[in-house]
Image: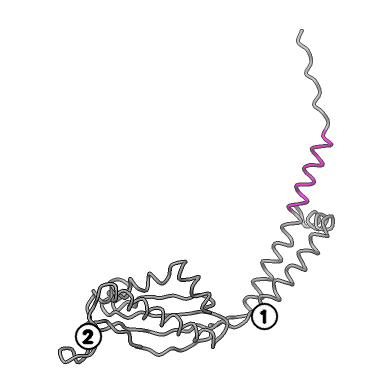
Amino acid sequence: MYFNDILRALGRRWPFVVLGFFLTAALGYQAAHVAPTYLASEILVVKYPISEDSPNPLTGLNPSIAVTAAAVATSLQTPDYAEEFRRAGVTGKYSFEPRNTGTNQEPRYVIASLAVTNTTDSEQGSLRALDILREAFVDKLTELQDRWNVRQDLRFIVATLVPASTTELSYSSQRALIGSALLGGLGTLAVPLWIDEILQRRRRGKGAPEPAPEPAQA
């Protein structure tokens, strides 16, 4: 198909070209006016209580505590808890991620610490969500120890290793605008050409002459 043929095809399907232009403009406007997104994070650690036998609880950590913390974190990421958190006011995405104390090649989850994160469009809302998530983790760990009748002086406790903080996620409106323009421009050209090709084939098919009958053999 030559350039003149493309122009004629677009001229025949100009309503689709106009529609694509307006859709591209709307997409570009939305891409250039995206609300800022904030990532709130806090690092918790599960440890033994301070006692005479264990004056520094961090020296007594072992993988069994890390496994317990990971199990509690996993149980809080089910659909039932997600709905409960939504009702409590948690918006956006949240996660409980056990922290790797080794390397990517040799991961080690010895220290029972985990990162609690929440990503949403409100800085204050993300911090409030962390409070709800932290409280839910503590309650779930307490419930687990109540179920196993763990003595009060031997129970795991939850402490804050890194206080809660928020970070505004980077977003380039210029790149989003360029991407929207390219995507919308390709669609504005491709869709009318595709529709024109289908309609032209149907028209040629309806107007094609019937094949002549074969001559009878002697």
Q: Nearer the viewer, mark 1 or mark 2?
A: 2
User: In which quarter of the view is residue 137 placed?
Assistant: bottom left
- Residue located beneath label 2 in the image: 153
Residue 196 magenta-highlighted: yes
Q: Is residue 63 above or below residue 56?
A: above
Q: Secondary structure at mark 1?
A: loop
Front-most of residues 217 and 150: 150
Q: Is residue 27 above or below residue 6?
A: below
Position of 86 with respect to 51 (left or right) is: right
Range drawn in magenta: 194-208
Residue 13 x/y as whole percent: 82, 56
Q: Pick the quarter of the image with the C terminus.
A: top right
User: In which quarter of the view is residue 191 placed?
Assistant: bottom right
Q: Is residue 138 above or below residue 7?
A: below
Residue 214 x/y as whole percent: 78, 18
**Marks 1/2: CA distance?**
54 Å
Who's the residue at 37% across and 70% down the image?
74
Front-most of residues 8 and 195: 195
Q: Amino acid at mark 1?
A: His
Position of 204 with respect to 140 (left or right) is: right
Position of 180 with respect to 81 (left or right) is: right
- Residue located beneath label 1 in the image: 33
